[in-house]
Amino acid sequence: MKIKRLELSNFRNYESLCVDFSDNVNILYGDNAAGKTNILEAIYMCATTRSQRQSKEKDMIRFGCEEAHLRMIAADEITQRRIDMQLSRSKAKGVALDGQPLVRAGQLFGLLGIISFCPDDLSMIKAGPAERRRFLDMEASQIDRLYMHNLSSYNKVLAQRNNLLKQVSLNKELLGTLDVWDEQLVEYGSYLIEKRAEFTQKLEEIAKPVHRAVSGEKEDIKLIYTPDTSVRDFKDKLFFGRDRDIASTFTTVGPHRDDLEFEINGKNARTFGSQGQQRTTALSMKLAEIELVRQVSGKAPILLLDDVLSELDRNRQTQLLGFTQGVQTFITCTGLEEFVMQRTGINKVYKVGEGTLS
């Protein structure tokens, strides 16, 4: 499916906006803080119900307003779908598909395969484990609808268990009630562990030739999923670690502590890789994602490139843009003239002002 239209009301710095997009390459250019990234955020929100910037929903509502409304029209050769979203300062967000309210936000996953790439993603390799877990979670959700359901359920149970641990530290009689939460944590967590391992294996198969090409045939990449616990040992580790958990008042074992390692020519990229190698690795991951989504769904994903080209050298720019063939792409940038002179295949160009597009 391709995104045909986006309508915004009181979202970020946009009081009112209605814009139609090309099925191919769309350029949004303008000064910093003009609102380019807000457009990409709105697209990502409509496709996933979440912000790729990890923003709070209330922060997306225009200053001085109580609600924000988003509408996105997507279509393929046969079907047209409409996604409506309402953000409110006083109640939970509402999401509807073709006019029908959704019970779970995760029901949207799989409708649109969408991949976001921003400068922060280039630091994913050297950042902490939380960033790499987020990468695993968001991309695994693109190809497995049940993944987001299990992830959301796991996080809710984890929060409940952590809250109970604080109470148990004050009242030991509540210790037995941990059994109920442990069972649920193992159920949802085991699914995450298994699917993360499967996703990592699939991604590595695609990433290997991609990384060879991006690195000029100089580097081989290996992805290593490092779960905090195995499925087999999860339940026992929770039980025997209770005293430690009660003392620390949080759960010290589980997939919320997983990590993903990258090796370049047999060496850990985070520890021994140069900045250039780390950036190449992050780029390879994004390019591999595009192909993985295409293979699993049979359809090309939608690609959001948020001011990332300015962070890449000419070779990496060429490699990245080579993957936009046949992919609906949204690119934000500050400088337009040089970009347009050097690139072809651009279908629509928008100048972004303060809350306006032209």
Image (cartoon, rainbow, N blue to C red):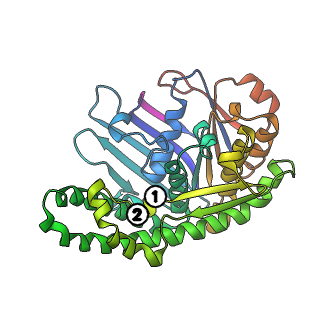
Looking at numbered disc 2 in the image, what kind of residue is underneath it?
Val
Above or below, comparing residue 252 to residue 214 in the picture: below
Q: Residue at x 47, y 75 (%)?
A: 231
Magenta residues: mostly which secondary structure? strand
On the image, the x and y values in percent for residue 121 come to: 60, 43
Which residue is at the far bottom? 232
From the viewer's side, name the closer residue of 42 and 306.
306
Looking at numbered disc 1 in the image, what kind of residue is underneath it?
Arg
Residue 143's image quarter? bottom right
Residue 188 shows in this picture: yes
Contact between marks 2 and 1 (CB within 8 A): the answer is: yes
Category of crowding for the residue at label 2, using alpha-carbon neighbours closer than 10 angstroms: few (below 14), some (14–19), many (at least 20):
some
Residue 253 is tagged as 2
Taking the image as shown, residue 182 lies to the left or right of residue 176, namely right
Above or below, comparing residue 303 to residue 143 in the picture: above
Taking the image as shown, residue 102 lies to the left or right of residue 24, namely left
On the image, the x and y values in percent for residue 26 come to: 65, 38
Q: Which residue is mark 1?
A: 257
From the viewer's side, name the closer residue of 156 and 32.
156
Start-end of magenta stretch: 13-18
From the viewer's side, name the closer residue of 51 and 214.
214
Residue 181 is covered by the magenta coloring: no
On the image, the x and y values in percent for residue 100 come to: 34, 60
Q: Residue at x 29, y 57 (%)?
A: 159
On the image, the x and y values in percent for residue 313 come to: 78, 34
Residue 273's image quarter? top right
Q: Residue at x 66, y 63 (%)?
A: 203
How far apart are labels 2 and 1 at the CA level? Answer: 7 Å
Category of crowding for the residue at label 1, using alpha-carbon neighbours closer than 10 angstroms: few (below 14), some (14–19), many (at least 20):
some
Q: Quadrant of the C terminus?
A: top right
